[in-house]
Image (spheres, rainbow, N blue to C red):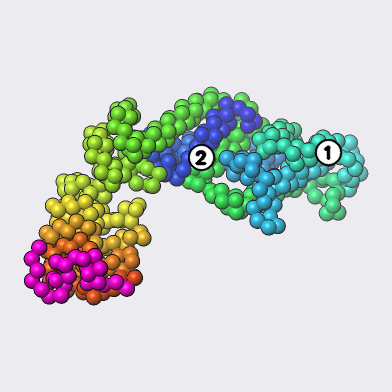
């Protein structure tokens, strides 16, 4: 068990997907009718494995052969083993040997310890079975050298554990694990419930207890591995979490057929083919989305047209900054790129619609859910802030009229409100609408900078007049202690200086 076509397909999926970034998980992909992105390719695989596991288990319960006690326990062991394989995905040899923190075991020592303990557990079981069959007098002894007799040279074992790369150790461990499954799966319940030899505990335990130690001990150190990976700055990404679920579900299928090797072969082959096909598609989606992001940055319109013509859904791709490529193109003022992405069929979200001045799209979204109008984007801005920043006058006025928050503070280090976004270009129509709707005229963004600071810096007399009309305080200091008046004077902006001082300077 374990080296069949289904295992091979799932392993190939894991090899391809374990390095997917969290952003990659949101790239456009459908599993059946579900369109939540690449993550659905992984959780859909889990779904299908679980479905097959339940189907085969039910079929076996109806037609046999019955699952024995030893097979139930081996299934628990095998599930833990598959999860260990998932935990070790993508670990480099450098990480394998790196000390995670003072006094903490490197992964090499943890894995070697798990493997060494299982060699002893297995030898105890094999010795117990042999002594039961020979009619030995209880309590059974555990003969010296039994571990080596059953599992091979200790010196050769530790030469592998201490000196070989992770891939080699994993192969040795996998061969041993398959041996455990193959040699124990047909042990009758009466023997399995019988005694094992006395070991260091100086107590007699059953063979069932010894086999349960495989899983309990492995689970204990799997937790240790998880802690170690965090110390190594090797976080459990979304993709890795899904792959762990997939490996657990794979074990459920394999456990359902343990001791019944002919069960469900056709279904396993069919699912393996589906998983293999999906793996290729997911790899292509992630690769093409990364190519698209590069093309957007480079203003490479031909490449964008080529990719989106072949795969229109990828026009909705996400950048590594977690923003849609459409929004990145808008920020970068890449008009031709924006046009290509829109022509490919991508529909602007509420933030892109605000930045583009697409009032009709905003209306459609607001009819579906009014809450869209006060959402914060991944980069911390609201639709109104974006409409103000991009000087989309009609859109900003529509949002203000439809109760967009005129005092919303961006959830990022800039901490701007709509008034600050408007002050960057000085659109007086938008600015007046914000102030009449109750925008705080003296709100400070990062660094204590206010809208009247911006007017002073830009020497914008009409904006200064409007802000002062609504109570702007030109003597409010920024984080460096500089007022708007001092800023205007320092930069030689005489027109705004005169306005602030109460003169009638005309620009």
Which residue is identified by label 2?
Answer: 19
Q: Nearer the viewer, residue 295 or 366?
A: 295
298 sits to left or right of 249: left
Quarter of the image where the C terminus is located: bottom left
Residue 387 % position (x, y):
21, 53
Q: In the rendered image, is residue 328 in sight? A: yes
Which residue is identified by label 1?
Answer: 155
Relative to residue 402, is residue 255 depicted above or below?
above
Q: Residues within 10 Å of mark 1 (few under 14, many from 20)?
A: few
Q: At 40% from the left edge and 44% from the top edge, which residue is drawn?
A: 320
Which span is picked out in magenta? 481-507
SS for dot 2: loop
Q: Is residue 484 magenta?
A: yes
Residue 77 % position (x, y):
67, 42
Q: Nearer the viewer, residue 7 or 356?
A: 356
Q: Nearer the viewer, residue 301 or 314?
A: 301
Mark pair 1, 2: CA separation: 36 Å
Q: Is residue 207 magenta?
A: no
Checking the image for residue 498, the label placed there is none
Q: Nearer the viewer, residue 184 or 461?
A: 461
Q: At 90% from the left edge and 43% from the top edge, which residue is drawn?
A: 144
Q: Decide which of tag 1 and tag 2 comes sooner along the chain.
A: 2
Relative to residue 143, is residue 438 depicted above or below?
below
Label count reads: 2
281 sits to left or right of 217: left
Relative to residue 186, is residue 124 depicted above or below?
below
């Amino acid at each position: 068990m374990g080296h069949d076509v289904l295992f091979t397909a799932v392993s190939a999926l894991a090899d391809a997907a374990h390095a997917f970034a969290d952003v990659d998980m949101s790239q456009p992909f459908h599993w059946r009718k579900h369109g939540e992105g690449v993550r659905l390719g992984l959780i859909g695989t889990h779904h299908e494995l679980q479905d097959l596991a339940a189907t085969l288990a039910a079929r076996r319960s109806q037609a046999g052969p019955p699952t024995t006690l030893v097979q139930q326990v081996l299934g628990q062991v095998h599930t833990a083993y598959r999860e260990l394989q998932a935990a070790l995905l993508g670990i480099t040899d450098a990480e394998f040997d790196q000390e995670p923190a003072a006094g903490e075991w490197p992964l090499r020592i943890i894995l070697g310890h798990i493997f060494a303990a299982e060699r002893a557990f297995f030898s105890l079981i094999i010795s117990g079975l042999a002594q039961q069959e020979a009619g030995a007098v209880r309590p059974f002894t555990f003969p010296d050298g039994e571990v080596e007799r059953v599992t091979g040279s200790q010196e050769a074992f530790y030469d592998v554990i201490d000196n070989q790369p992770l891939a080699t150790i994993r192969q040795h461990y996998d061969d041993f694990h398959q041996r455990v499954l193959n040699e124990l799966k047909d042990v009758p319940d009466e023997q399995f419930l019988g005694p094992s030899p006395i070991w260091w505990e100086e107590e007699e335990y059953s063979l069932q207890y010894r086999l349960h130690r495989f899983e309990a001990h492995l689970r204990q150190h799997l937790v240790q591995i998880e802690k170690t990976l965090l110390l190594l700055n090797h976080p459990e990404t979304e993709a890795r979490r899904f792959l762990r679920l997939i490996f657990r579900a794979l074990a459920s299928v394999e456990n359902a057929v343990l001791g019944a090797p002919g069960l469900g072969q056709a279904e396993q082959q069919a699912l393996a083919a589906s998983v293999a096909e999906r793996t290729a598609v997911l790899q292509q989606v992630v690769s093409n989305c990364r190519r698209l992001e590069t093309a957007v940055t480079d203003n490479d319109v031909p490449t964008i047209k080529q990719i989106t013509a072949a795969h229109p859904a990828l026009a909705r791709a996400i950048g590594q900054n977690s923003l849609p490529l459409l929004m990145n193109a808008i920020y970068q003022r890449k008009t031709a790129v924006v046009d290509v992405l829109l022509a490919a069929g991508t529909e602007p979200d509420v933030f892109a619609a605000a930045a583009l001045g697409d009032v009709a799209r905003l209306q459609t979204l607001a009819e579906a859910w009014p809450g869209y109008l006060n959402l914060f984007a991944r980069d911390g801005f609201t639709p109104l802030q974006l409409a103000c920043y991009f000087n989309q006058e009609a859109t900003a006025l529509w949002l203000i009229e439809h109760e967009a928050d005129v005092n919303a503070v961006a959830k990022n280090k800039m901490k701007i409100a709509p008034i600050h976004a408007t002050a960057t270009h000085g659109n007086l129509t938008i600015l007046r609408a914000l102030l009449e709707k109750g925008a705080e005229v003296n709100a400070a963004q990062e660094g204590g900078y206010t809208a009247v600071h911006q007017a002073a810096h830009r020497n914008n007399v009409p904006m200064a007049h409007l802000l002062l009309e609504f109570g702007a305080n030109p003597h409010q200091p920024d984080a460096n202690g500089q007022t708007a008046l001092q800023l205007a004077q320092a930069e030689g902006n005489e027109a705004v200086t005169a306005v602030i001082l109460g003169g009638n300077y005309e620009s």
